[in-house]
Image: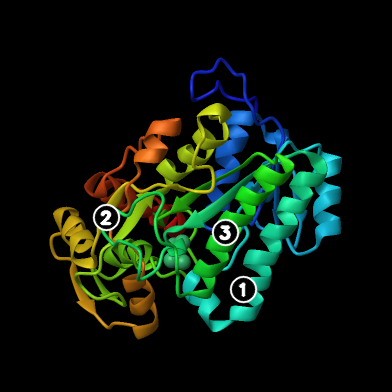
Amino acid sequence: MEPLEDPHGKGGLHVMKRIIVTGASGQIGIELVPYLRKIYGDSNVLATARRHVPGPVSEGGPFELLDVRDGKTFSKLVSSFKADTILHLAGILSAKAETMPQESWDINLGGTFTALEVAREHGAALFFPSSIAAFGPSTPQDNTPQVTIQRPTTIYGVAKVTCELLCDYYHKKYGVDTRGLRFPGLISYEALPGGGTTDYAVHIYYEALSKGRYTCYIAPGTYMDMMYMPDALAAVVQLMEADPSKLVNRNAYNVSAMSFAPEDIAASIKKFIPEFEISYDVDPVRQAIAESWPNSLDCTAAKEEWGFDPEYDLDRMTQDMLERLKQKRQATEG
Ligand code: SER
């Protein structure tokens, strides 16, 4: 496929030209890779993952197997592909990481350290997806500032803060063009998230359509930040194409499009499926993680420094999610 025109109106003068994506089998990668290929051209986006990924990620352009802890292979791929940008998505999500803290540290922290070293070696830019998990119970919970207390209590969050600091360090010490976003819960219809705390906000749509009801593992009244995947994909490209002289808070920017509790998303679904019912069976582990994270982020820095401007609010997202999932169901049912 030929590259599309620059979506950000810079007349096709992309900063990124040759992009390698790690963790391309994950919830973000599955959608980010085809999205990038549309903008930059199929052959200019190399997707990598620990295992083979069927579908557009491996069939729509170059694909290689990569364990991000394997620095030699990582470096060889960046060199032979002549990548100028590494979008480093590989990682284990919060709830799953709590079941395997040591291995998660190795992948989440060790993998990012390796990615930074490869970026330094080859002069590549690096995108790091941080998270609302980089905050903890002592962080101000409402309208959480860009710069504030970060004392997370999960192994996932501890690795995210460490990686934010490492990205700052590599930028200051070696001039690596590191940039990052603190993603909220991401909601999407192409691939399910695996082992996160915010996953309920994806599962609820699937079960609203298949069963008309959903049993939620997060308690009512628990607010977390969320964003629809199209806004997340646009934010990655916008940040990586932003004028570097404007980036003060590089690693990493608060981004969020909405903040809701389970009863709010249920009410939104009821507008489209009136008979939908939510009930609760709270999982203490994921509930404790959710309570340690902010209720709502202040995204002023992202708006001011590179124009973050998400499109989807809760109802618009609900309408789109339900339509897309219905179409998917019809396609698989033949
Ligand atoms: N969505 C992620 C999780 O729940 C947070 O970054 O683990």
Looking at the image, which residue sits at the far top?
11
Instruction: Locate residue 109: give its quadrant.
Output: bottom right
Discs 3/2, front: 2
SS at circle 2 = strand
Q: Is mark 1 within 8 Å of ligand 1?
A: no
Q: Position of residue 207 (x, y in %)?
A: 32, 68
Label 2 and label 1: CA atoms lie apart by 27 Å
Point out the quarter of the image occupied by ligand 1.
bottom left
Q: Amino acid at mark 3?
A: Gly
| Mark earlier in primary sequence (3, 1) | 3
Which residue, given by chain and number where applicable, does mark 2 sit on?
259
How far apart marks 3 and 1 lie (CA) works out to: 15 Å
Q: Which residue is mark 3?
A: 26
Locate residue 77, reporting x and y percent.
82, 48
Instruction: Give the image location of residue 324, x and y in percent.
Output: 37, 49
Q: Position of residue 213 (x, y in %)?
A: 23, 71
Q: Quadrant of the N terminus?
A: top right
